[in-house]
Amino acid sequence: DEIIVRALDAGADVIAEKPMTTTPGKIARILEAERRSGRRVDVTFNYRFAPTPARIRELLASGEIGRLLSVDFHWYLDTSHGADYFRRWHAFRAHSGSLFVHKATHHFDLLNWYLDSDPEAVTAFAALKVYGRNG
């Protein structure tokens, strides 16, 4: 968060990899610097550029499949792909925010992008059934 805040205060817009940061306090500092500087932080999300998500957004935006009223979203992580998470730098909560933050940020971004809107309410259920706790 320190580098992002310094860049904003220097008058630069910032493009950050996700997670932008990992704690509510750091997020608050970044948002305050963004407000104070009048500059902007954007976080990159590569799923937007995959063919299937791009097509889903196109269909939703066109109205071809009707008006969306609510979303029930499930994502089942391939255990071999998820296991790789624990062999890399983001296996540590201090670096990545956790497996939930590392993966779910993509899904929240896709939903906001699909709907061109922010959520009004969110509920969630999660369990540590396959991988267990992470550092």
Image (cartoon, rainbow, N blue to C red):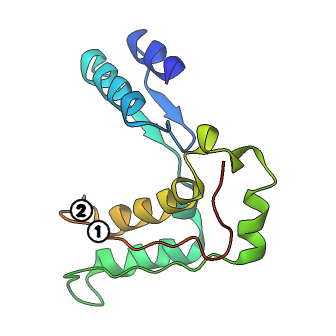
Q: Return the residue at label 1.
A: 115
Mark 1, secondary structure of its residue: helix
Q: Which mark is residue 107?
A: none
Give the residue at the far right of this rendering.
87
Q: Which is in the foreground here, disc 1 or disc 2?
A: 2
Q: What residue type is labelled 2?
A: Pro
Q: Nearer the viewer, residue 38 or 129?
A: 129
Q: Which mark is residue 119?
A: 2
Horizontal arrangement in the rendering, residue 16 relative to residue 32 (left or right): right
Q: Is residue 91 above or below residue 35?
A: below
Q: Quadrant of residue 96?
A: top right
- Picture coordinates of residue 115 (x, y %)? 29, 68
Mark 2, secondary structure of its residue: loop
- The residue depicted at 41 percent of the width and 18 percent of the height is 8
Q: How far apart in space, not on screen, are marks 1 and 2 (Cα)?
A: 9 Å
- Picture coordinates of residue 84 (x, y %)? 79, 62
- Picture coordinates of residue 20 (x, y %)? 50, 38
Q: Is residue 133 above or below residue 23?
A: below
Horizontal arrangement in the rendering, residue 84 relative to residue 133 (left or right): right
- The residue depicted at 43 percent of the width and 25 percent of the height is 13
Q: How many numbered circles are shown?
A: 2
- Residue count near mark 2 (Cα–Cα under 10 Å), binned few <14, some 14–19, many ≥20: few
- The residue depicted at 61 percent of the width and 76 percent of the height is 129
Q: Which amino acid does label 1 sit on?
A: Leu
